[in-house]
Image (cartoon, rainbow, N blue to C red):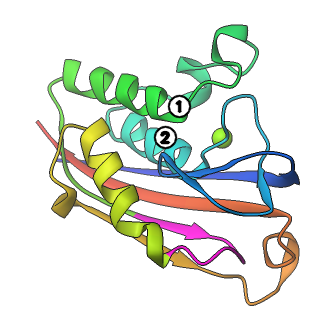
Amino acid sequence: MRIGSGYDIHRLVPDRKLFLGGICIPHETGLLGHSDADVLIHAICDALLGAAALGDIGIHFPDTDPKYKDICSVDLLIETNRLIREQGYRLLNLDATIVAQAPKLSPYMEQMKNKLALCMETDSGRINIKATTMEGLGNIGKGEAIAAHCIVLLDS
Ligand code: MG
């Protein structure tokens, strides 16, 4: 068995759509990045790559490559899943935490889990997503950014 952890943070800015876990969530600001900046998917990709000792998301999908400009992060997760399966690994379970002051994410959790399960060709019962706020503290607490943490366990 192999364990991996991932972390990511992106800035929230006006005039961007907010994507989390492959789902577009209505909000007055969205995450800024070279891709659609889906911070949850980025943390998941890093955890999967970490567990398989395949480096990180920046190595596989460099933000200097125009090919990945505004790419849907779902496509990065599908490719990451392909890479870990190529090495003979499969997901045992995934546990992630989104740190966001707003919006309220509980109405979207099931949709996110189903979408992620589809991308990773697994059962949504292997995926857990939690959300917490920063109680108003720091940049995330002020609504200037969203972060995500993820831990995965793979077996071969
Ligand atoms: Mg990122």
Range of magenta residues: 96-105
Dominant SS of magenta comes to loop
Residue that extends furthest to the left in the rendered view of this protein = 156
112 on left or right of 46: left
**In the image, residue 40 lies in the stretch drawn in magenta:** no
Which quadrant of the figure has residue 132?
bottom right
* Labels 1 and 2: the sequence-earlier one: 2
49 on left or right of 62: left
Task: Give the image location of residue 2, x and y in percent.
Answer: 24, 46
- 41 to 7, vertically: above or below: above
**Amino acid carrying mark 2 in the image:** Asp
Residue at 76 percent across and 36 percent down: it is: 33
**In what element is the residue under mark 2?**
helix
Residue at the spot of label 2:
46
Task: Give the image location of residue 119, x and y in percent.
Answer: 31, 37
The front one of 16 and 97 is 16
Task: Give the image location of residue 64, x and y in percent.
Answer: 76, 15
142 on left or right of 30: right
Do the numbered discs 1 and 2 sit on residues whose CB atoms are within 8 Å? yes
Task: Give the image location of residue 100, x and y in percent.
Answer: 67, 72
Residue at the spot of label 1:
56
**In what element is the residue under mark 1?**
loop
- 132 to 77, vertically: above or below: below
- 135 to 22, vertically: above or below: below
Residue that extends furthest to the front in the rendered view of this protein = 26
**In the image, residue 103 lies in the stretch drawn in magenta:** yes
